[in-house]
Amino acid sequence: MDFGPIEWRPKFATKQGENALCAPTPFLAIKEEEMMKNMNKMMELMKQWPNVDLRPHFKAHKSVDIAKQQIKLGAVGICCQTLTEAESAVYGGSIEDVFISNEVIGVGKVKRVVQLALKSKISICVDNEENIKDLSQLAKESNANLDLVIEVNVGQDRCGIKPGADVVPLAKLVESLPNVHFKGIQAYHGWNQHVRSAAERKERTNTVAGLAQKTVECLQSANIKCPYITGGGTGTFPYEAGTGLFTEIQPGSYVFMDADYNRNLNEKETFYSGFVQSLFIYTTVQSITGDERAVVDSGMKAASLDSGPPLVAGKEDSVIYHSGGDEHGILRPNDGFKVGQVIQLIPGHCDPTVNLHDVYYLIDGNEKVKAILPVNARDAGV
Amino acid sequence: MDFGPIEWRPKFATKQGENALCAPTPFLAIKEEEMMKNMNKMMELMKQWPNVDLRPHFKAHKSVDIAKQQIKLGAVGICCQTLTEAESAVYGGSIEDVFISNEVIGVGKVKRVVQLALKSKISICVDNEENIKDLSQLAKESNANLDLVIEVNVGQDRCGIKPGADVVPLAKLVESLPNVHFKGIQAYHGWNQHVRSAAERKERTNTVAGLAQKTVECLQSANIKCPYITGGGTGTFPYEAGTGLFTEIQPGSYVFMDADYNRNLNEKETFYSGFVQSLFIYTTVQSITGDERAVVDSGMKAASLDSGPPLVAGKEDSVIYHSGGDEHGILRPNDGFKVGQVIQLIPGHCDPTVNLHDVYYLIDGNEKVKAILPVNARDAGV
């Protein structure tokens, strides 16, 4: 892949061309060849859905360099989940088309979104009247334009309005106000991504699509066009794309994969057979106790445990990672590990793991560091 | 408290003197008065153990400003858990006495520790012969001196050698090598901190102290002095301090407290009765669904969920925070919250929550921002 200027900091003490095993652990490594395989596989899959756009989710990698590569290969733009992500993409990467797949609340943040819209094409999710009025008023004051996407709760029970008729007054409100434009609806169901059986993911996606369809019909009955229907993550995107209803999908994790998504692959679903693990946590063994355990320097601060622990690459079935607190992982049994040895972990869940790190080491097949890519939008979620 | 120069960044858009409620959420707020109450309470408690030093753990707050305040009030120095923490404290704060309560493994990291030892007094935990040899050799090459503390596994089953006779050959090795000095032992048991019953915490600490005592006796039998015995966190420090064996305690969380430690307080143990919650996550309500739920903009990226979810301050018993993924928390029921309202969460576990944030807003009783303090050592655990 192409990559931009490198951000150097003393604590990431490996130079381009050096072996990654010389870098201080824990750190995140991207195996470039594997990541490119995933990106190319996705573009290959997209060919069968000519009326569906790919808008990959920036929240998976938070990297301007990777986002640019995705756009170069054919993505129409990116999704962001937070204002900081969108600012990183627009100011840090000059990305021209950003959809914030989440509500942006409060005058301070709305002002910042409006500033972004003076530089790039920005769309945002909404589910609340007052927020829509704020967006319109502040956009008007700055002579900016925002596309608004009404979020519909299709079963995740997080944000979004009820599917169906409630969409109409909200869409009419948007259409009645200056400097905001009704673009369409978001029908995304996060938990469905992680259901193990491909057949069940497909069935659940059909339920989601049914609720989206019902909402679109309400808009049509009110003579409101709905040209944009977005949803679908790495676990379900082929099913959304295959409905003929969704116009855009927003998978993110596919570039990296993780232990959780890899468990979905056990189904050998055709769509997923070409995706491979490209993201690893490199960690050093710091203490051993006979054959009983080996302690590594990657704890909760290096690996998110929310979707299960990381796996030991190459020993996925024989060695188990147990939490050892903020800075330690405890591998049981000690399968011949030695103090000082650097080993590779497969993250349990890629997005929140990435958010714990400041940079990626982009490495080739010989562990050579090709670049150090900043995790541009790492933060608490502003 | 005193604080040093302020680090400003555009995304932390609140100026000194402004109301914290104007800042973009989610963010961490320290209520200064409450934090000072905790620090003073600790110094008050310490008076009853004149032979025990307080060396607070930097891993709790990762803030040079707070560490300096602790030292000003009487702490002998600080504990760090990682190299980055120690570097932040020494280079960022000129802190003169740092104990790294963890092993530092690998030539790259050992070289960095040696550089630190040219600037401040550095002690480090060890549990491995090769590592001790590396430390000695590299310290000698730089004409630096390191104090080594042998870590003993007193029941947590993480790092450390077996209690008892195994300590002797390792201490002798340290004494035989140049530029490293045997300082004593670490006998710390992390899980004991979180046992709910004060009586049980005390009993378990007595077990820990018994194992430490046995180890010290082995050293004495071999004519090796052990002038330093360190351990004890916020949950058990009064019991370690009261043994007459420990020479130093290393609590960290007491400055902030958290939902998990607050559950310990239900015992009304005299030692803990004066500690109060001083750390809060400020978050904005971004979506509501009738009385059913209110969604806030603090997810796993703002609040570590490892020790249970955060609590809603003032509604600890009536509203429950459920994980909504990386960027969302789902409060059930919606107890009259409105979209745009800023509310306060009590972190479930302070240390890993702090590590998700770049700064603290230090606020007074009127929500006025007195300073923005950097979380100097936030990182993945290098």
Image (cartoon, coloured by chain):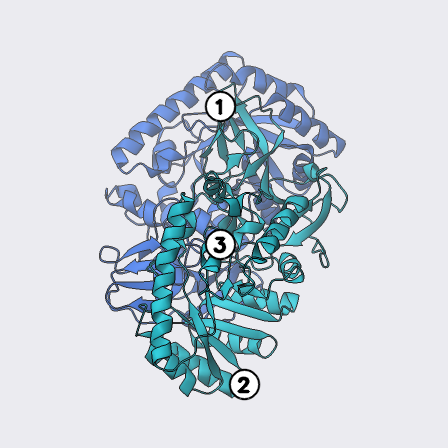
Chain colours: A blue, B cyan
Q: Estimate the x, y position of residue A70 in percent, counting from the top left.
A: 47, 49
Q: Secondary structure at mark 3?
A: helix
- Which residue occupies the foreground of this view, B218 or B10? B218
Where, quadrant-wise, is the C terminus of chain A in this rendering?
top right
Q: Which residue is mark 3?
A: B238
Q: Are marks 2 and 3 in contact (CB under 8 Å)?
A: no
Same chain assignment for discs 2 and 3: yes
**Could you say which disc has been placed on residue B205 in the image?**
none
Instruction: Tell me which numbered mark, 2 or 3, is placed earlier along the sequence.
Output: 2
Tell me: B300 left or right of A105.
Answer: left
Tell me: A326 left or right of B10.
Answer: left
Same chain assignment for discs 1 and 2: yes
Amino acid type, mark 2: Ser
- Which residue occupies the foreground of this view, A67 or B161? B161
Query: Disc 2 and disc 3: Cα gap in Å?
Result: 40 Å
Q: Which residue is mark 2?
A: B142
Query: Disc 1 and disc 3: Cα gap in Å?
Result: 39 Å
Q: Estimate the x, y position of residue B137 in percent, counting from the top left.
A: 45, 85
| Residue A56 visible in the current orientation | no
Q: Are marks 1 and 2 in contact (CB under 8 Å)?
A: no
Instruction: Tell me which numbered mark, 1 or 2, is placed earlier along the sequence.
Output: 2
Q: Which residue is mark 1?
A: B333
**Label 3 neighbour load within 10 Å: few <14, some 14-19, many 20+:** many
Instruction: Tell me which numbered mark, 1 or 3, is placed earlier along the sequence.
Output: 3
Amino acid type, mark 1: Pro
**Label 2 neighbour load within 10 Å: few <14, some 14-19, many 20+:** some
